[in-house]
Structures are given as structure tokens and as C-alpha cells.
Amino acid sequence: MSLARILSRTQLGLAAPLVQVELHVGRGLPGFAIVGLPAPVVRESRERVRAALLNSGYEFPAGRITVNLAPVELSKQGGRFDLPIALGVLIASGQLPAPPRAFECYGELGLAGELRPVSGLFLAALHAGNAGHALIVPAANGDEVVMSGHGAAYGAASLREAAARLSGTASSAALRPRAIEAGSSAGADRGALPPLPALTDVAGQWQAKRALVIAAAGGHSLLMVGPPGSGKSMLAARLPALLPPLSTPEALEVAGIASVCGLQLDASRWTRRPFRAPHHTASAHAIVGGGPRAMPGEISLAHQGVLFLDELPEFDRRVLESLREPLETGAITVARVGSRLTLPARFQLVAAMNPCACGYLGDSVQPCRCTPAGIERYRQRISGPLLDRVDIRIEVPRVAVEDQVRALALPPPHSASVSISDPASQVQAARERRLTASGALSARLSVSQLQACCALPGSSERLLRRGSQQLGLSGRGVHRLLAIGRTIADLAGSELIEPPHLAEAMQLRRSLPGS
């Protein structure tokens, strides 16, 4: 036959639309044309395919070869189309029979015919499984594909192996799917992972630890303000240990984003929530996403996890302002010429900053060298609308030398069993209570949901009115204040938001410390 069709998929943000690789070998002067909106790297596959076919012992047709990547309006990127194009040449030239079932093929070809891995195959495998298509992928992508749970995926190390599998003459079995459940000991054969940093490593800072537990229980954003060396980064790194493991749907989302970005998937980290800490010099595209190929940014890589921004005022103003929309909606829309993509970005923001440019405003040991005007300019690097979207703001003072020495001298506490006073257990219980009652964490409740679950006694209502006026809270500020109070009540096992819960929430919902 002179016409062949092989299935594959392109990558468009977090989508993997189906692409038919149509190939025709006809009469005429020898030529090799690829149409259908291919990127330059896809057009370059002509030379890779030609060399791989010849070096694998096949003949290259002498006629005119036309490759159409349909639908034509979709942009095609990367080297993943090398293998389907090469297999299409073999079928159209009669060197290989047509496959007995629908196969999706992926892989970059080396000049000697070896099959090299490509990125984004986790999402492609998920979509192929839903469509009931079999898969042929590079052997190096095998671990990534089996984690999707696909039951008819085959790995190949070379073009000849892929051709044998497509024709049904290969004897190798399909890759065994490994759909990993939340909480399972995934990847135990790879060696145990080191435990996450615990709060017990931090000396003192009881208020900051309490705020961290509240933030973890309700999914609240958190800003820590304190002098250098007070432990802000150390505290932020211990938030993941308080969060419950990812559920299976959440883990699939996180793995899909990582796969699209070319990050290696590790089965042993399947249920661990992501923790992203970009440098303050990162651009808006790096944080939010976008660029020529509209790739996910750090806020999407932190989806279902934690985004830590250290030295918050040092970030570019445009970068900080771009966080306002995803903090409210849990998603970010990236618009480019000819495309518009919505990327998930339901992250928990944790930020840290110094109280002033020199870092020692209000410090008990080191005097501040900044002028009042300099302090004001430093604070104004963070806009009011962005600060209003940060739920909890706390001061992290310098730890006393005695507390540091005592923490280093004493042995770590014995953790043979987890007691009810364990903060991670308290966070888990509070989250389950709120998810069962409202279907969402406190920080993600709408106004109507908060009204339904935030029963206020008369004393609490009077305290809310008086505190909101004194703090000068906006409508969003009152909403966030109630959400924090609801989280504190959940931690206490209370159905009502009592005055002590609301009072503690007001202490956590102050202006920037020192202002």
C-alpha cells in the first residue's frame, strides 16, 4: 500500500490532543515533505528518519513522500513524531504490514535507529488509556508510562523493536501497569525516602509553629516577617510534613504537570506534595507559565502543594501582581496568539521577608539602620491588593541564644508512635472534618459556604464587628478572617466559632508586623 496512518498526540499545555500521522508514498521526483503546522524540530525529523531507516536495515523509498500531521490547526512540537513517521514510511512502502489494532507511537530516533525518550508521555498515556489505544514508547519512558496505569503499553529500544511490536511479531510482554494508590509504599524497591523535615527541628518560635499548623489545616496562605536568621525558611520547609499525602486524583494531576515540564517522575514520591522555592530573580513566565510553547510555570508545578517565595519584596513587581488571580481562582489563564490555555495552580503560598531593607527593624539585638522613608519604600514593594489576599501574617523574631543552645544540646525526641498531639495528626483530623462538612478546606470556601458553616454565637459576632472595624478589614479581609476562625475551631473540634477562636484569627490577620 502507498498510504499509511499512525496515531500519536501533540502536547498543548496540559492537554494531549490526538494527531493522525498520514503518510503517502507516490510517484515523482524523490522528496520528503512534512505539512500540518510542524515546528522546525519536527521538519528536521526527515533527516533523522532517513538515516534511522537505512541504518536499521530497511529501504528508503525513492518516490515522493508526503507526511500530513492532522488536524492541521494544532501546533506540533518536539521529536516525538520521529517514530510514527518512520513506521508510516515502512507501512506505506510495503515493508511492514498495517497494525491489527489502533496504536499510538512516540519516540525520537537516533541516526543508528535507537529510540530516545521524550517528555510529556504520562499525559499521553492517560489519554491513550481512556481512548482504548495501545502504546509503543521508548523503553526509557517505561517507568513514566506504567505509573499512568495503562494496560497495553510496550517499550522499545530501537526502530526495529517498535516495528516488530507494531506488526505483532514481537514476543515481549506489555509493560505491567502500576497504578499507585495514595498512602501506599510506592517505590519501596528503590529504597526508603528520607523523612520530611519536622517542626521539632525548630527551636522556639511557638507562635510561628502554631500559625504553620493552622495554615496547613485550612490551606491558608502565610507571610512570615522577621530578621535574617530567625528561621523563616526553616519553618517553611517543614510545612510539607504537616500536609496529608496526595490522593490518587491529585497525584495524577501533579504527575501530569511534572511530565509536561520534562521532570523525571519518581514512584517513591508519588504521594508527596510538591514544594517549589523559585529564586527571586525568576521571570513572570517562569513563575506564571507561558513562553513560546505556553509551558506551566512554578505556580502550576506547585499545584496541590506549597509555593515558597523567600525574600518576597525582592521579586519583580509584575511577578508578584501576577499571583493575585491564581490565589483567588486556583488556576491561571495564559493567552498567546492563536491559543488560550488554562493551567491549574491551586497552591498554598508561603512567603518570607525582612521587616525592612537592612532586616533588623524591631530586632532585640541589632539596631535598624533604615530611615522611615526607606522602610516605607521597602514595604511598598508589596501591593495592598496582594497583601489582602494573604490570609495569615506573623512576626518571626530572633530566637534567643539560650533556646538555640538548649535545642542543640538535647537529643531529638523519641518518635516510636504518633500521638493525638502530633501536629500532622491534628492537621489531618481538621482537614477531614472540614472536607466532610463542606467539601472544601476553609481557605477555599465561598461566601455562601462560609455562611453555612460559620455559626457565630452572639459574643463572637460582636467581636467580629469590633475587630473588623479596628483592623480596617475589607470585605475579602472579613471573609478570610472567618475562614481562619473556622480552621481554628476545626482544630479544636468545635462546631461553633467561639470568641477565643476568632481572637486568635485576628492576631494572625494583622497588618505587616512593625508597621
Image (cartoon, helix red, strand yellow):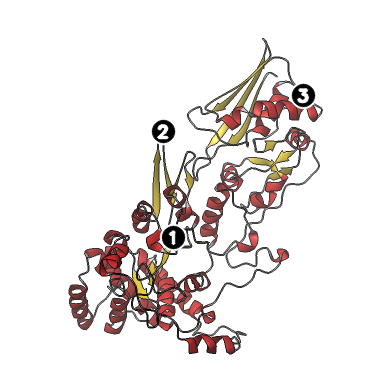
- Sequence-wise, which precedes: disc 1 or disc 3? 3
Quadrant for the N terminus, please: top right
In the drawing, what numbered circle is on residue 347? 1
Picture layout, residue 465 above or below residue 115:
below
Using residue 374 as the reference point, say whether residue 214 is left or right of it: right
**Does the image show residue 446?**
no
Report the front residue among 175 and 131: 175
- Residue at point 36%, 55% (across, down): 329
Regarding mark 1 in the picture, which secondary structure is present there? loop
Quadrant for the C terminus, please: bottom left
Three-letter code, disc 2: Gly
Local packing at callout 3 (Cα closer than 10 Å; few below 14, some 14-19, many 20+) is: some
- The answer to whether the residue labelled 2 contacts the one labelled 3, judged by CB atoms less than 8 Å apart, is no
Name the residue furthest top.
Answer: 28
In the drawing, what numbered circle is on residue 338? 2
Report the front residue among 384 and 93: 384
- The residues bearing labels 1 and 3 have C-alpha atoms spaced at a distance of 51 Å
- Sequence-wise, which precedes: disc 2 or disc 1? 2
Three-letter code, disc 3: Gln
Using residue 7 as the reference point, say whether residue 285 is left or right of it: left
Local packing at callout 2 (Cα closer than 10 Å; few below 14, some 14-19, many 20+) is: few
Residue that mark 3 sits on: 95
**Does the image show residue 255?**
yes
Residue 433, given in percent of the width and then of the height, sits at: 41, 74
